[in-house]
Amino acid sequence: MEQSPAKPLKVPKAGDTDVVPFSEDEIEKILKACDEYDGVNQRRLRALTDLMLESGLRISDAVTIPKDRIVKTSHGYAATLRTAKTGTAVSCPLPDKLAKSILALEGKTPFWSGTSDLESPAKNWRKIYARVFKAAGVVGHPHQFRHTTAKRLLVKGVPIGHVASLLGHSVKICEKHYSKWIPERQHAFEASIRHSWREQA
């Protein structure tokens, strides 16, 4: 064969993955399902869910976090770590009640035995969340907690640079995925469109 038949083919371009946070109604259903979960992981399940919602941590970072990375500062508790995916240093403020509930759990790593490889705990918790989401009647996956955190903060007016730092992103990446939830940007967009109507009248 003188020439590969695949040579004329171009590499396909993958579209951006759509970022879909949970709605507040879905979060309420998920938390209710966590509280009603029948199993030995019930207390840890609710604490882990609250941790991801408050910190924006990926599930792989949240489930392997050791207690000594939850520290009390002069401003309150925070989770400080380097993310497994990018190695980025992040510091996530945590409500006192949540931090104390995690510190009260057994073990140095309360969501992981600490003996398996790093992939196993996230895989196991994803299976638990699949049951939780089914019980809640919600279609989704744990990474949507991270998107929900970003959306909540931006909607409340937290600067995108602060949200980017919390997530361990650059501002550019954060803008790419979450700009639709920046109220000021949406308001400016709508105002410019309405202004164009007046110009045409």
Image (cartoon, grey):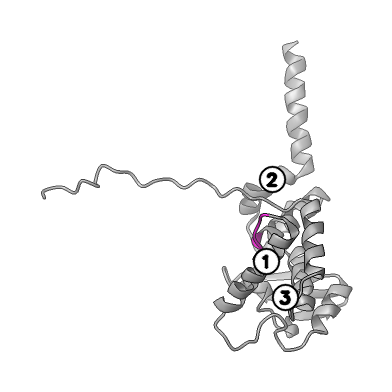
Residue 80 numbered tag: 3
Tell me what residue is drawn at x 59 percent, y 89 percent.
115
- The amino acid beneath tag 3 is Thr
The residue labelled by disc 1 is: 131
The residue labelled by disc 2 is: 179
- Where is residue 98 shown, x and y percent of the image? 84, 73
Whether residue 180 is in magenta: the answer is no
Tell me what residue is drawn at x 65 percent, y 86 percent.
113
Q: Nearer the viewer, residue 17 or 106?
A: 106
Mark 3 to mark 1 CA distance (whole Å): 30 Å
Q: Give the extent of the magenta segment.
A: 139-143
Tell me what residue is drawn at x 76 percent, y 50 percent.
23
Q: Nearer the viewer, residue 153 or 48?
A: 48
Q: Regarding mark 2 in the picture, which secondary structure is present there?
A: helix
- Where is residue 188 shown, x and y percent of the image? 76, 34
For the C terminus, the image quarter is top right
- Location of residue 67 with respect to 200 vertically, above or below: below
Mark 1 to mark 2 CA distance (whole Å): 32 Å
Q: Residues within 10 Å of mark 2 (few under 14, many from 20)?
A: some
Magenta: predominant secondary structure element? Answer: loop
Q: Quadrant of residue 118?
A: bottom right
Tell me what residue is drawn at x 80 percent, y 79 percent.
102
Q: Are marks 1 and 2 in contact (CB under 8 Å)?
A: no
